[in-house]
Every structure is written in structure tokens, then in C-alpha cells.
Image (cartoon, rainbow, N blue to C red):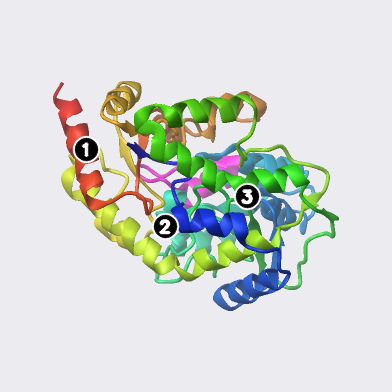
């Protein structure tokens, strides 16, 4: 069985660490020191990445609009709205997962109150930072880097992602590039602009317990799915809401990052380079073995700079391919992203209007992301590539 997410980053060693790492306050300080050294800024730790984004946005006047990529997660949109700012959507450049300086300028012309830009580097693949940075400086725009996908990514001008903007926001949630089950961080490099103070509260006992057991439960689901037990276990856990969920609603207060999560995050950061090398090797297998018309969003140069959190392909009749692969023991139905603001079921809760980002809409209708995580090996990547080619010939 091959899965894209649902505990994709975990092995049995990680399971044990999640269950038994103590809540030692020193783990929080160790993580802060590591992040400050790596990204050269003041660090605030949070329980969710979206809280970090909201915190950065509250540093600036409420009248400003915020530009976000028109191909993103609902959590990003929600963070902007929660901060009291108006989100506006920047379309993708053609054959790209990111917006460009050109599409940013188009959005800016329609929204002169746009003063803050959130840069995503979707799936870890870097944007053309040089031109975007020039556009931001020319128009006096504040730049925030969202590194949920792209911790470890290098921009084409060789600057590490997360070292450029006034702020950098991290998500350390499930299936992200750095996965600590939960967690977020805000890096502040513009020290003259500090976020507004907001109270922090502890996670509830139930929330913390669900996070502790999430790696174990997902590990068991993955290991026993082929005999049917994992499927039953997954259904029971979802029915009774016993699996930790990353898409929980905002609250009026931020939640503290538990020390045991900080310990897991620090360990993931220290292994980041090896993690990226593995993901790049798996991605290169897909790039070399799949037809080029499927891989137009990726080239070898961008792959070599990317964290490759997933590998994107574009296919018509995506639902048919997903169903076919399922019959081959390959489960890839968790799509990033199935809409301009995803999951698509949340689109009607946004101010997005059909046609705002036509390129993003087209890609959202066709994209399918292939696994690159540590539990994906070379043999599996070749198997997935081969089955996709068989499906294309049907």
C-alpha cells in the first residue's frame, strides 16, 4: 500500500518519540535558538502555522489588503480574514505553481490598497524571487514568506527560502515539510515592526493527547490497511473524532506549542537536508519516467532547488486515475489543491469569485500530487510511474 499523507512522515522511532518525549521547557528554547540562528530573526513559537501568519499581519494597519496566491489552503485565507485584513488573490504564472511579478502587478493595479504579499513556494518549488522582490520594493510592499511547504527550498538567486521577507511563517503540522504533528513559528526580521500582543493558552488535555497518539494511530492504519484492519480502524477513528485534525477552527487566543512537539520539530530540522535529498531523488524518478506533458509544472533545475514536499502532475480525468491507482494499492486522493482555495468545499466561505485566477482554476482541475516522503522508496516511485503510464494507454 502506498499513501500520500496520513502520517506519511512517521516511522516507529517517531511514534515512540511522540508518545514518550517529556514536556521539558528547555526544548522550546532549543528550537528557538536553532530557528534564530538559521533564519536570522526574532522567533515566536505557536501551535499552528496560521497563527504565525495572523500574528505577522497584525503588525500593520488594518486597512491594508493582503495578496495571497490564488492556489492555496483555506487556512491561509482564514488567517488573513482573522487578522481583519482583506485577502486578494494573485493568479499563477503559466506552467507554474507560483505567482510571478507579472501577475502580482496585475493584481496590484486592481487593488491599490494591497500592501502585504504572502509568498508560498507551492509544494516547495521556488518562485522567481528576484523579480517579485523588485516589484515589492518598487511598490513598497511588505513581504511575508510562508514556509509550510518550502523549508529548505533555495530560490534561483541562491538565497534560502525564509531568509528574505520581513517575516517568515512556518507550519510544522501533519504531512508538512517539517512535521512535528502540530506547531508553527514566526520569524521576525523587521524588528521595528512587532506583532500585536495576544494571549496564549495551553492546549486542552484532549487536544494534546490526540496529538500524542496521532503518529501511532496513523502508523497502525498504514501498516494494516492491506489486510483491511487499517481501513476499519481509520473509519472508527474518524467516526468518533479520535484523529488529530490540522484544519481546526481559529479561536480567540493563540495556543502554546507544547515542549514535546518542539523537540520533534527540532529533530526534523536537524535532518532537513537528508529529507530533501531523498525527496529530490524520488521526484527525479517521476520527472524522468513520466511523459513530459504530465510534468510541465516542474523542470530539473527547479527540482534541484526545491524541498519537493510533493511532485505535481497534470492529468485530464483525474478522478479516473485516482480510482485506477487505488485498485493498484496506491492512494493519492488527498489533492493539494483541488480548488483555488482548498479544500474546494470551503470555497463558498471565501470572497473568491470564479475567474479571479483562471490559471490556478485550470491547474486545480487537473493536478495530482505524487508522494515523495520518507516512506516512499525508489521501487515504489517506479511502480507509480509505470501504473500512470498504463492508465494513459487505456
Q: Which mark is residue 212?
A: 3
Residue 57: quarter of image? bottom right
Where disc 1 sits, the SS reads: loop
Where disc 3 sits, the SS reads: helix
Q: Which residue is mark 1?
A: 293
Q: Earlier in the sequence, mark 1 or mark 3?
A: 3
In the rendered image, residue 21, in percent from the top left (x then y), is placed at 62, 62
Residue that appears at 36% across and 42% down:
94
Instruction: Check the picture and name the quadrant holding the C terminus.
Output: top left
In the rendered image, residue 146, in percent from the top left (x then y), is placed at 57, 55
The answer to whether mark 1 and mark 3 are in CB contact below 8 A is no
In the rendered image, residue 61, in percent from the top left (x then y), is placed at 79, 54
Towards the viewer: 173 or 341: 173
Q: Taking 343 as reference, is 281 left or right? A: left
Is any atom of residue 76 visible in this view?
yes
Residue that appears at 54% across and 65% down:
162
Residue that appears at 44% across and 48% down:
98
| Residue 99 lies in the magenta-colored region | yes
The magenta segment: 88-110
| Residue 34 lies in the magenta-colored region | no
> How many angstroms separate mark 3 from mark 2 (CA)?
33 Å
> How many angstroms separate mark 1 from mark 2 (CA)?
21 Å
Towards the viewer: 111 or 221: 221
Q: Which mark is residue 126?
A: 2
Towards the viewer: 255 or 15: 15
Neighbor class of circle 2 (other Cα within 10 Å; few <14, some 14-19, many 20+) is many
Q: Taking 60 as reference, is 48 left or right? A: left
Q: Is residue 341 above or below residue 41?
A: above
Amino acid at each position: 500500500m502506498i499513501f500520500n499523507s496520513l502520517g506519511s512522515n512517521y516511522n516507529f522511532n517517531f511514534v515512540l518519540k511522540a508518545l514518550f518525549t517529556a514536556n521539558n521547557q528547555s526544548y522550546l528554547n532549543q528550537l528557538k535558538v536553532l530557528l534564530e540562528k538559521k533564519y536570522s530573526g526574532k522567533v515566536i513559537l505557536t501551535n499552528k502555522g496560521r497563527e504565525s501568519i495572523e500574528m505577522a499581519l497584525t503588525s500593520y494597519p488594518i486597512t491594508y489588503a493582503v495578496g495571497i496566491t490564488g492556489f492555496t489552503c483555506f487556512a491561509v485565507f482564514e488567517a488573513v480574514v482573522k487578522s481583519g485584513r482583506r485577502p486578494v488573490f494573485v493568479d499563477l504564472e503559466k506552467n507554474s505553481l507560483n505567482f510571478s511579478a507579472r501577475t502580482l502587478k496585475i493584481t496590484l493595479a486592481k487593488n491599490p490598497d494591497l500592501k502585504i504579499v504572502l509568498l508560498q513556494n507551492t509544494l516547495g518549488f521556488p518562485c522567481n524571487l528576484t523579480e517579485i522582490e523588485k516589484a515589492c520594493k518598487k511598490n513598497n510592499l511588505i513581504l511575508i514568506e510562508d514556509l509550510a511547504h518550502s523549508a529548505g527550498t533555495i530560490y534561483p538567486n541562491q538565497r534560502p527560502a525564509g531568509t528574505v521577507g520581513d517575516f517568515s511563517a512556518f507550519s510544522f503540522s501533519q504531512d508538512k515539510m517539517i512535521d512535528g504533528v502540530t506547531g508553527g513559528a514566526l520569524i521576525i526580521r523587521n524588528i521595528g515592526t512587532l506583532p500585536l500582543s495576544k494571549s496564549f493558552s495551553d492546549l486542552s488535555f484532549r487536544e494534546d493527547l490526540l496529538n500524542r497518539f496521532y503518529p501511532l494511530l496513523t502508523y497502525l492504519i498504514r501498516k494494516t490497511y492491506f489486510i483491511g484492519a487499517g481501513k476499519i480502524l481509520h473509519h472508527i477513528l474518524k467516526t468518533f473524532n479520535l484523529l488529530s485534525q490540522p484544519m481546526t477552527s481559529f479561536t480567540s487566543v493563540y495556543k502554546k506549542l507544547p515542549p514535546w512537539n518542539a523537540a520533534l520539530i527540532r529533530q526534523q530540522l536537524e535532518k532537513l537536508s537528508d529529507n530533501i535529498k531523498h525527496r529530490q531523488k524520488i521526484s527525479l524518478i517521476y520527472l524522468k519516467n513520466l511523459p513530459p506533458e504530465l510534468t510541465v509544472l516542474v523542470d530539473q533545475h527547479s527540482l534541484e532547488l526545491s524541498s519537493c514536499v510533493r511532485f505535481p502532475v497534470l492529468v485530464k480525468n483525474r478522478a479516473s486515475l485516482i480510482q485506477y491507482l487505488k485498485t493498484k494499492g496506491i492512494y493519492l486522493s488527498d489533492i493539494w489543491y483541488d480548488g483555488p482555495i482548498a479544500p474546494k468545499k470551503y470555497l463558498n466561505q471565501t470572497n473568491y469569485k470564479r475567474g479571479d485566477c483562471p490559471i490556478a482554476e485550470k491547474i486545480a482541475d487537473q493536478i495530482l500530487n505524487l508522494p515523495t516522503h520518507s516512506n516512499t522508496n525508489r521501487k515504489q516511485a517506479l511502480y507509480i510511474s509505470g501504473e500512470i503510464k498504463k492508465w494513459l494507454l487505456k
